[in-house]
Amino acid sequence: MIRTQSEALFSEALQYIPGGVNSPVRAFRAVGGKPFFVNKAKGCRVWDVDGNEYIDYVGTWGPAILGHAHPKIIAAVKAAADHGTSFGIPNPAEVTMAKLICSLVPSVQKVRMTNSGTEACMSAIRLARGFTKHDKIIKFDGCYHGHVDSLLVKAGSGALTFGNPDSAGVPADFAKLTIVLPYNDTESVKAAFAANKKQIAGIIVEPVPGNAGLYLPKPGYLEFLRESTKADGALLIFDEVMTGFRLAPGGAQERFGIRPDLSTFGKIIGGGLPVGAFGGRADIMDYLAPLGPVYQAGTLSGNPLAMAAGIAALEELGSRACESADHPRSHERGYDAYGRLEHLGALLEAGMKDAAKSAGIPMTFNHCGSMFCGYFTSEPVWNLADAMKADCERFKKFFHAMLDAGVYFAPSQFEAGFLSTAHSEADIAKTVRVAAKAMKQL
Ligand SMILES: *Cc1c(COP(=O)(O)O)cnc(C)c1O
C-alpha cells in the first residue's frame, strides 16, 4: 500500500508537534512504522490522504458507535452551528442532554458535563474526596481514567503501551494517595480496606476494562466492589467513558445490574465532538459548586455543538428503527442498535477464533457486546498480568498485515476494538478472511 502523502505529512508534523501526534497511541510506536493521515471517514470506513480505504475497528477510540459521519449527527451539528458555537450561558440543549443521560443510566440522578473523559474522572475523584472527607483512592492496574495526575499510576492505554505506566511530572506525594490493585482479585481489595479503614474516598474502576485490551469482570466481582465500598463508607465510581451507552443503553451498570454511586462518561455522548460527563446520586452531586463546597467548572462545558451531536447520537441509538444494509427492516423484529452490535460482535468472535485455530496460532479472544480484543496467548485473560503474556511481536506483524489489506485495528495489543452499527456482515466476513490469511503467515 502506498502512503507517500501520509509519510510527508508525518515528517512535517514531527517538526511542530511532539512525536507528530496530539495523543501518543496514534504514533504507532507499539507496532512500529508510521501513522497514516486521514481526511475522510464515513460509516465503518476511513480513507487516508493517499486515497487508501480501510475498514475501521477503532471508531475514533469509541465514540463512533453509529459509524463515522452519521447523517443525523452531521445535520444536528450544522443546525446548531448556525445559531452559535458557544454561549457560556445556559442553553436548552444542556437540559435535554442531562435528562437523556438520567433517563438512560439507572444510577444517575444528576449529571454535569465536561469537555473530556479525563476531566470527568478528575472531577468525580475530587467530588468523592469532598463528599467522604477521605483522601485515598483505589484503582486497578491496567485501567485508564484519563491523564489525571493521581490516576496515572499503573494506567492502561498509551501509558501501558510505552512501558512506563507512571508518568514523569506526577509528584510521588500525589501517587501516594492512589492504591493500585490487580483487577478481578477480591482478596487484595479486602486487604486494602482493612489496612486503610475510613481513609478511602472511593474505588474507581472500568467495569469492563478496555484500556489493556479487553477483559471481563468475573461473576460476582462487580457486586463485591459494590458491597465492599458500601461497607466502608467509600464510593463506587464506574468509569464508563468507554462502556457507557455502548454495552447497553445504560452502559455496563445496566448490563451487569450494579448501581455505582458515581459514573463518568465521554466518547459516545459527544457524537464525535469533545465531551465528558459525570453523574450519580443527587445527594453527592449536590456537593458541587455552586450548591456545595467542591469546585468544578468549564468554559466550554455543555457547549451547544457537543450537546447537539451527543443528543443526536443518543436518540439514534435509542430509536428501534436502526436499519442497515444487512437487515433493512430489522426494527420490525425488535432488532435494535444494541441487538445488532451483539450480533456483529458474536460473528467477529466466531470468525477470529476459527481463523486462529486453522492457522494454529494461540489466541484468546475476549468480547463483550461491541468491544473486543484478540490476545496472542493461549491463556485466559482476566487482568493486566494475564494480558502482558500476549506475544506483542506477533501482534505487530498481524497489525501491519491487516492494515496493508485494508483493515485497521488499534495499533497496540493493549487496546480494545470497537464495532459500530455501520459495520455489515460483509465487512466482518472480509475482516475474518483477511485475518485468516494474515495469521497463516505469522
Ligand atoms: C478514553 C477514556 C478516558 C479519557 O477520556 P478522554 O476524553 O480521552 O480524556 C477515561 N476513561 C476511560 C475508561 C477511557 O476509555
Image (cartoon, helix red, strand yellow):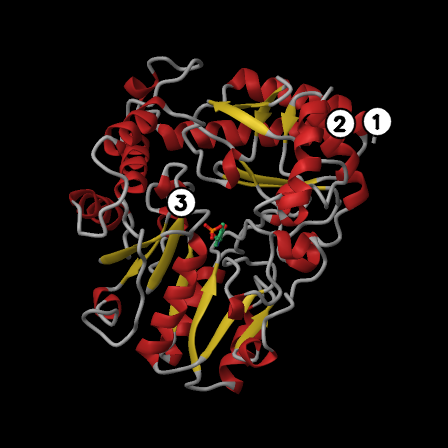
Q: From the viewer's perspective, is the residue at label 3 or at label 2 nearer?
A: 3
Q: Residue at x 23, y 30 (%)?
A: 82
Residue at which label 2 appears: 401
Q: Position of residue 66 (x, y in %)?
A: 41, 29
> Does label 3 point to a residue whose CB lies under 8 Å from ligand 1?
yes
Q: Is mark 2 within 8 Å of ligand 1?
A: no
In the rendered view of the protein, which quadrant contains the C terminus?
top right
Residue 175 appears at what percent x and percent y? Answer: 57, 75
Disc 3, disc 2: CB below 8 Å?
A: no
Residue 152: which disc? none
Q: Is residue 215 above or below residue 346?
A: below
Q: Amino acid at mark 1?
A: Gln
Q: Which mark is residue 274?
A: 3
Residue 2 point in image, percent of width and height = 73, 20
Task: Find residue 218 and report its horizontal and vertical position in percent.
Answer: 54, 56
Q: In this rendering, which labeled residue sits more in front, label 1 or label 3?
A: 3
Report the Cα–Cα distance between label 3 and label 2.
Answer: 32 Å
- The alpha-carbon separation of the residues under discs 1 and 2 comes to 9 Å
Q: Is mark 1 within 8 Å of ligand 1?
A: no
What's under tag 3, amino acid-wise? Pro
Residue at mark 1:
441
Q: Between 35 and 223, which is closer to the camera in this rendering? A: 35
Local SS, label 2? helix
- Frontmost residue, 258 versus 289: 289
Residue placed at 31% from the left, 55% from the top? 299
Three-letter amino acid code at disc 2? Ala
The residue depicted at 39 percent of the width and 40 percent of the height is 273
The crowding category of the residue bearing disc 3, from other C-alpha atoms within 10 Å (few below 14, some 14 to 19, many at least 20), is many
Q: Is residue 327 above or below residue 131?
A: above
Q: Are marks 1 and 2 in contact (CB under 8 Å)?
A: yes
